[in-house]
Image: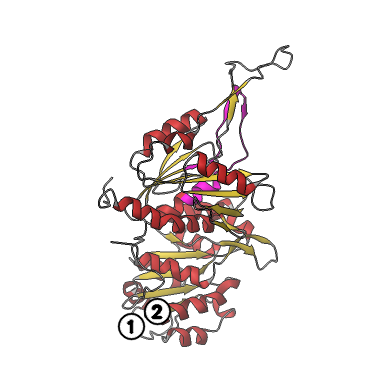
């Protein structure tokens, strides 16, 4: 079976309970509700009391064609024990926007209003669309709550990078309505576009030690690779993430192998590569290492210093010659001659796609939440992407190579879901 045509997909027969909370992005939920209704879904809206200060309930009643539910103790409008009836009727619960408050309440099992009570009572999948201030989104307490919910099987549509209500730029902006509706469609399609595909992702830096305390490395945080791994897993892939030193926690539901040096990364990649249908190599592997490593700390007073270097293993290049039908995607972080360097890497390593970025551009360097990428293909095509979150870029990369991944896999027999 080929990939589902999401553009033409309808939602007839599906019931979506939409929770609207008191974030400034609540107005965007209007378009989401309208779009889901037009696609044939039965849409029921639950508003928190704070949300009603931003958008009138009559708006959602008109767009959904059903009464809007607000108070937990108000007289039933359609059924007895509304929080149970709504919870049982839902095929999907969609919370848009999901504030830090509602995420914290769900993570803590708090049921102090109708929305949080319905979430607690439902057995349907729950999809949250976080939207909040950039600093709130990166707050370790919020991040811990999100990780907990992801680990429990809750679904997330990651916030976009853009101008926030405060006027500042950052990640925390609610995605546009069409992106949220697309995520709903993907869910109901069973995330079929990457189901049964083994995806191998490399991420982060490597470290090449001079001595026990000093090493040669890069500023890579691993954020791009972790975003690709999570996006692939959310679309049904079986994902293995090989990462160098990174402060990011292991993504739930993903096999993670942590390494230090380029040699260790090469060994891990070779061990995992055999069954991969797609390899996305985002790791910033150190190209050189000290020719000699001291087992003891090199003292400042030492007269002769070990200054010789040698090349490290070419992690991606070593698997290119034994690729089979795997699709290979490489990344190129450059400071000059972006297209020429990306094209050279594409050809020398026989890649199917190179994602290049100019690290001198604002928002496109290491340790950022965003990227500004140029996609370069073997036939000479290029695609310049705008500034976007790394998750948005990850989704685009996966969508761009999906036809080629499916084409290659079809030549090797049916895709199975067995490990």
Quarter of the image with the N terminus in it: bottom left
Between disc 1 and disc 2, the foreground one is 2
Q: Taking 337 as reference, is 114 above or below it? A: below
Magenta-colored stretch includes residue 221: yes
Q: Which residue is labeled 2 in the image?
A: 39
> Which labelled disc corresponds to residue 79?
1
Residue 343 pos. (x, y %): 56, 46
Mark 1 closeness class: few <14, some 14–19, many ≥20 residues within 10 Å: few
Quarter of the image with the C terminus in it: top left
Tell me if residue 152 can be seen. no
What residue is drawn where x is 44% and y is 55%? 401
What residue is drawn where x is 43% and y is 65%? 127
Mark 2 closeness class: few <14, some 14–19, many ≥20 residues within 10 Å: some
Q: Taking 289 as reference, is 59 above or below it? A: below
Q: Is 315 situated left or right of 389 in this image?
A: left
Residue 227 pos. (x, y %): 50, 51
Magenta-colored stretch includes residue 349: no
Residue 67 pos. (x, y %): 43, 86
Which residues fall within the magenta stretch?
202-228
Residues at marks 1 and 2 touching, judged by CB atoms closer than 8 Å: no
Q: Taking 246 as reference, is 195 above or below it? A: below
Residue 408 pos. (x, y %): 34, 51
Number of disc labels = 2
Q: Taking 206 as reference, is 212 above or below it? A: above
**Colour scheme of this structure image?**
secondary structure
Q: Is 347 situated left or right of 162 in this image?
A: left
> Which labelled disc corresponds to residue 323?
none
Tell me if residue 162 can be seen. yes
Mark 1 or mark 2: which comes first in sequence?
2
């Amino acid at each position: 079976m080929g990939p589902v045509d999401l553009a033409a997909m309808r939602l007839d027969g599906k019931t979506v309970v939409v929770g609207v909370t008191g974030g400034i992005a609540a107005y965007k939920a209007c378009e989401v509700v309208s779009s889901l209704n037009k696609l044939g879904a039965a849409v029921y809206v639950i508003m928190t009391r704070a949300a009603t200060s931003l958008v009138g309930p009559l708006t959602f009643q008109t767009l959904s064609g059903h009464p809007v539910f607000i108070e937990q103790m108000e007289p039933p409008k359609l059924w007895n024990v509304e929080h149970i009836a709504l919870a049982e009727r839902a095929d999907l619960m969609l919370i848009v926007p999901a504030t830090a408050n509602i995420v914290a309440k769900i993570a803590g099992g708090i049921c102090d209003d109708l929305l949080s009570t319905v979430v607690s009572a439902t057995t349907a999948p729950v999809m949250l669309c976080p939207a909040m201030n950039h600093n709130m989104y990166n707050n370790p307490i919020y991040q811990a709550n999100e990780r907990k919910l992801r680990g429990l099987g809750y679904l997330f549509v990651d916030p976009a990078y853009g101008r926030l209500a405060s006027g500042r730029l950052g990640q925390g902006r609610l995605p546009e309505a069409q992106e949220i509706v697309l995520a709903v469609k993907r869910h109901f399609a069973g995330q079929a576009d990457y189901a049964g595909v083994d995806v191998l992702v490399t991420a982060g830096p490597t470290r090449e030690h001079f001595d026990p305390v000093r090493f040669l490395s890069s500023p890579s945080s691993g954020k791009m690779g972790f975003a690709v791994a999570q996006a692939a897993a959310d679309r049904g892939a079986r994902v293995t993430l090989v990462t160098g030193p990174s402060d990011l926690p292991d993504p739930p539901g993903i096999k993670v192998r942590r390494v230090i040096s380029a040699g260790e990364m090469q060994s891990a990649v070779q061990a995992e590569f055999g069954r991969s249908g797609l390899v996305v190599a985002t790791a910033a592997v150190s190209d050189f290492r000290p020719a000699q490593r001291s087992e003891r700390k090199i003292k400042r007073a030492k007269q002769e210093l070990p200054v010789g270097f040698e090349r490290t293993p070419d992690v991606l290049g070593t698997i290119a010659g034994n690729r089979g039908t795997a699709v290979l995607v490489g990344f190129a972080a450059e400071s000059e001659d972006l297209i020429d360097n990306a094209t050279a890497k594409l050809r020398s390593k026989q890649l199917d796609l190179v994602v290049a970025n100019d690290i001198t551009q604002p928002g496109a360097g290491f340790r950022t939440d965003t990227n500004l990428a140029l996609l370069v293909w073997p036939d000479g095509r290029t695609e310049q992407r705008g500034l976007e979150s790394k998750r948005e870029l990850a989704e685009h990369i996966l969508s761009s190579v999906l036809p080629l991944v499916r084409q290659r896999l079809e030549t090797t027999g049916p895709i199975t879901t067995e490990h």
